[in-house]
Structures are given as structure tokens and as C-alpha cells.
Image (cartoon, helix red, strand yellow):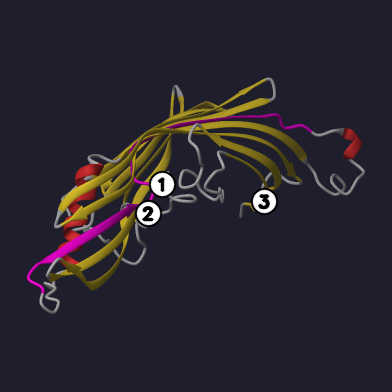
Amino acid sequence: MPTKAAWPELGLGFSGLVETRAGLVDYRLYAVNGVNLDFEFEGEVAAEPDGNSTVGVSKFEAEFAPSRGGFSNDLNGNKAITGRLGLLPEPGQEFAVSGYYGRYTPDFMDSESVWSVAVDGLHTFGGFEFEYEVVHTDWGNIEDVSASFARAAVDKEVEAKVSAEGGETTEIVSEITLGGLAESRTGYWIEARYPFWPKALDNTFLGRGFGNPSLEPTVRMEQVVIRNRITGIEFSNRQITELDKEKSSIVNRATLGLAYRPVPDWVISFATEYTWTDEQTLAGLTNFVPAGENEDSVLAFSTGVAYTF
């Protein structure tokens, strides 16, 4: 996903369970505000000599990146549709498909949509739990989106015609930076867990007073292929002068963790994560990992607490 964490969005929908001969069917369907493009503008006007005259130069910088839908209002006036349909034939077994579709460009740009389709599942065999998900996300024609954004930004924010002293012409130079916008992303993760509880821990502080504690060692592998990621676009007088694009990047992560559940609804987890890429740097490719310009791999440690109520 293009955001740094879970992707909550404000919306309205319905969900439920239906009992069938094949098992329980879990359905969910929602209309939400939809993903948006966040953008920032900076501009300055300067006079530069050009032979015997002075040329007014307007230098303009803009940055935009996709983000989850807003909670206060709908920034592009359109809704996204998202849903999931799952089959639970028996406890510990589940298979589901899900999807997302909606416009992500603001009103002042041409309409372009983002869509995702995913498959996920959970299967239990002999005490082992296997969980997985495969997701493909497509952002449409991002080159046209970049060009449309650049032209709209220049028209909107640099409208004044610069006329420096003695100057007869005006040049507008724009540099557009894109934060994580790629034509498509395809990724998967697969996780194996084995919940157990050693009797030797019954009389320790980990087991004393708890009815059904457990330990869950976990191994997880994940990979994302990012295709045609635009890293920068430069404009001069509303014409593209340079388009920086990475054809494809692969990001991998392996995780080894341990979860402790004193009761089923509480969990304390510890994990070590190793992330690496086929590119020269992880900077700009991953969330949360503060990779340097020349780091193509990072080792990280994490811990967390979660509970339900």
C-alpha cells in the first residue's frame, strides 16, 4: 500500500455472515471517501540576465503523493467502493477475495482511478497455522496524471506574468516530485505460526493465574514488485523536459517473531525484520524503515501489544 500503516477511510457499508452448506460466508461492502493525492506548492520569482536583456524566471516546485481518504471531507467529490467476500468452511480455515476501486485525482485534474484486487486465506494443519495474502494495485496512467498535475499547478500557482526590469520574456521552470506513485504494485506475504504452551512455564509469572496462555513463534516472508515508479518530472513552459522513472523495483522482507498470549484476547509480540532490495537504496521504497541513500538492506527490531474488547 502507498501509505505508512493500515488504511482507514470514512464511509458507510454493511457486513454479515450467512450460513450455507459449504460453510459460513462472510461479506462486507462499503462506500468510502477514497484515496487522494496530497500536494504542496512552493514558488519564487527571480530576474536573470540573458544577453542584453533580463528574463523573468519563475521557479516552481511541487510535491504530491497518494494518501488515504480524508475524514473531514471528500477532496475529489467521488466515492470509492471496497469489499470482501470470504468462505469459512470450518474453524481455522478461510479463503477470501477482496477489491477496491475509486478515483484518486482531485477535481482540477483529469479523472484517473486506482483499483486493487486481493486474495487471502488462513489454513490450519496439525497445529500449524498458515496465513497469506496476494495484492495487486494499479494506478492507471500515472504519466498523464503527472503531466496534468504539473500543468494545473503551473496554471494555478504561477499565474502572474513576470516582467523584470528591461525584460521582455518570462520563463517558467517547474520541478515536480512524486512520493511513491507507481503504475502498479504487486505483492504477497505468507506467514506460518505454531501456537503451543510448555507445561514448564505453568508456575512462572507467564502462566500463573492465566487459564489458556500460549506462545506463538512466527516466520513471515513478503515481497513487493513496484513497476514504473515515477521519481521526478520537470516542466518548462508547460512542456515536459525530463521524466525520471524506475522501470521496476523489488522489495523483500523476512520476519522472525514470537508472540505471547496470556489470554486469547491479549498479545505481546517481539520480532526481528530483515528488509532488502535489488535497487541501490531502500530510501523511498519502504514504510517506516529510515534507510540512507546507500543502504540496500536494513535490520530492524520491533515489539508491540494488542488487545480486543
**Going 23% across and 43% down the picture, which residue do you hit?**
143
Q: Which residue shows up at 21% across the image and 60% down it?
A: 173
Q: In this view, does 228 lie to the left or right of 305?
A: left
The residue where tag 2 is placed is 67
Q: Earlier in the sequence, mark 2 or mark 1?
A: 1
Earlier sequence position, callout 1 versus callout 3: 1
| Tag 1 residue | 2
Please give left or right for residue 213 compared with residue 22 in the image: right
**Image point (46%, 47%), residue name:** 284
Q: Position of residue 226 (x, y in %)?
A: 40, 35
Where is the N terminus found, in terms of image quarters? top left
Nearest to viewer (mark 3 / mark 2)? 2
Disc 3 or 2, which lies upstream in sequence?
2
Task: Tell me if residue 204 comes above or below residue 122 in the rendering.
Answer: below
Relative placement, left or right, of 25 versus 112 is right
Asked whether residue 34 is drawn in magenta, I would say no
Residues at discs 2 and 1 in contact (Cβ within 8 Å): yes
Residue 119's place in the image compared with 48, above or below, is above
**Labels 1 & 3 near each other (Cβ < 8 A):** no
Which of the two marks, 1 or 3, is nearer to us in this view?
1
Give the quadrant of the C terminus. Answer: bottom right
Q: Which quadrant of the view contains residue 75?
A: bottom left
| Separation of residues labelled 1 and 3 (CA atoms) | 23 Å
Q: Name the residue under label 3.
A: 304
Magenta residues, start to end: 167-196
In this view, the residue in front, 8 or 168, is 168
